[in-house]
Amino acid sequence: MFVYAANVPISTTLHLWLVKYCTPLVILALLFHLPFVFVVMGGATLSIVFNLLDKKETNPRFRQLAQDLLGKALHPSWLLFLGVIPIVCISALQLQIYGSAPDKLMQWGVMLALIVLGFVLLLLYQYTFARRDVAFLLHIGCGIAGLFSLVHGYLLFIYNKGILLYPAMWEAMPNPLDFTSFLSFFPTFLPMFVLFALIGLAIGGGFMVGKFGSKKMVAAKGAEYTGFACKVGLYVALVFTALQPAVVFWHFTFLPRAAVSWPVLVVGLSIMVLGMLVCLCIYGALLRPGSFFEKLVVALLFLNVGAFVADDYVTRDAALYEQCQYVESKAVKAMPRPAGYNPVVQGQEIYEMKCMACHTMDGSPKVGPSFKGIFDRTETVLREGKEVEVIIDEAYVRRAILSPAADLVKGYQNLMTQQNLSEDELQEIIAYLQTAK
Ligand code: HEC
């Protein structure tokens, strides 16, 4: 809805209502979906890395870990309830809210297809583990392609949502799938995506700590193997958590002004503080394997996901105000006026939004002459270089607004900018100026 390509319908009150009341639902779905996706992406990355390490220099622990990591993360019923269903719901809702013009359908559709394809390929990777020794390239190829597809899908996801945040994107997107326009906005949403990826990998590490640190696992697989897995998980979580504060800071430098508010700063700061706490706990867990520090690391990492979602929410919330104003001004311009409305009220709003910077209502001159008593006063203007006396009437005001340079009021500079008012708006501002006695 906020992307005003010419073919996108103008918003209605239903849209605004949806934005207001359905955003919490989207967030709830994200709270279930994101941790799962993080675990899958982090787990798949680590699994592929260990799979390749084992190929290079056979190590039964690496091989076991590569297999266990994905086996634990990608259970088919989890995949359905935490993976596919929430992202389909989120997309459907967002399309409802932000308009379902063909280009938007494409944009969300391609994203969904990539994500589902990614899940399917990773399942294939998991199932081909049995045939790993005879067809390694096929097996690892499925894993890498699946991961790539997921990463690409979520890059599009962040991008699709980024449109909400960056006002510059609303008008400039004739075709959102056009790769050059995608690239030109890349820097603005890149920090958000990098943060997303870092949290994903850190959660992947935390997942290993939680999974392999459990008593059941230790009993089943032996302390030596699970101890090794926990240690790997801790180092992964440490590295990818330690990088987060820098990215949060980087994101701040790109946020549009309307999106920066106190909650945004507070949530950003809490991601940094949480990150530091996680690092401290990891240090403790490395010093004392099997202690409560491990559990604390896992809990704090999941809090981190919450902070990420909160960050997404508060930045969007702050930008929403500006968006609503934008939508309203567009809608007002395009909508037929209802019968019996008061054009003077509308005219006053236009005055306050577009003219007040240069024109006063109290008789004092500013950049331009005051509007006080403007109708029927006599004035000297420069027309084609000659001074002429005019009595200000509706035709003159119209001309003054539509082509400001045609008549220059004596004593003023040619500073009035083109106002770009619709016919309705012109009538409204004139009605308002007629009341300015
Ligand atoms: C950037 C400053 C600026 C803005 C914004 C601006 N004006 Fe002006 N306006 C001027 C200046 C300077 C003049 C005098 C020079 C001229 O006549 O072009 C002027 C002149 C006029 C006049 C002729 C006044 C007279 O006494 O003859 C009218 C009518 C007018 N503006 C209407 C508007 C309306 C309506 C808006 C808002 C939709 C608007 N202006 C916004 C600067 C501005």
Image (cartoon, helix red, strand yellow):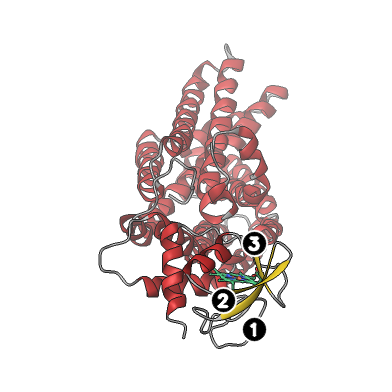
Look at the picture and state if 223 lies above or below 118: below
Front residue of 259/3: it is 3
Disc 2 crowd rating (10 Å Cα; few below 14, some 14-19, many 20+) is: some
Residue 317 location, x and y as percent? 48, 64
Ligand 1 contact, mark 1 (Cβ < 8 Å): no
Q: Nearer the viewer, mark 2 or mark 3?
A: 3
Front residue of 168/429: it is 429
Residue 7 location, x and y as percent? 44, 40
Disc 3 crowd rating (10 Å Cα; few below 14, some 14-19, many 20+) is: some
Per the image, the residue denoted by label 3 is 406
Ligand 1 contact, mark 3 (Cβ < 8 Å): no
Residues under labels 2 and 1: Cα distance?
A: 12 Å
Look at the picture and state if 356 lies above or below 222: below
The residue under label 2 is which amino acid type?
Met
Front residue of 329/422: it is 422
Per the image, the residue denoted by label 2 is 356
Per the image, the residue denoted by label 1 is 365
The residue under label 1 is which amino acid type?
Pro
Q: Is residue 130 left or right of residue 247?
A: left
Q: Secondary structure at mark 2?
A: loop
Q: In this figure, what is the number of numbered marks? A: 3
Name the N-terminal-most of marks 2 and 1. Answer: 2
Q: Do the CB atoms of the residues marked 2 and 1 lie less than 8 Å apart?
A: no
Q: Residue at x 52, y 15 (%)?
A: 131
Q: Secondary structure at mark 1?
A: loop
Front residue of 321/228: it is 321
Name the N-terminal-most of marks 1 and 3. Answer: 1
Q: Residue at x 53, y 84 (%)?
A: 372
Disc 1 crowd rating (10 Å Cα; few below 14, some 14-19, many 20+) is: some
- Ligand 1 in which quarter: bottom right
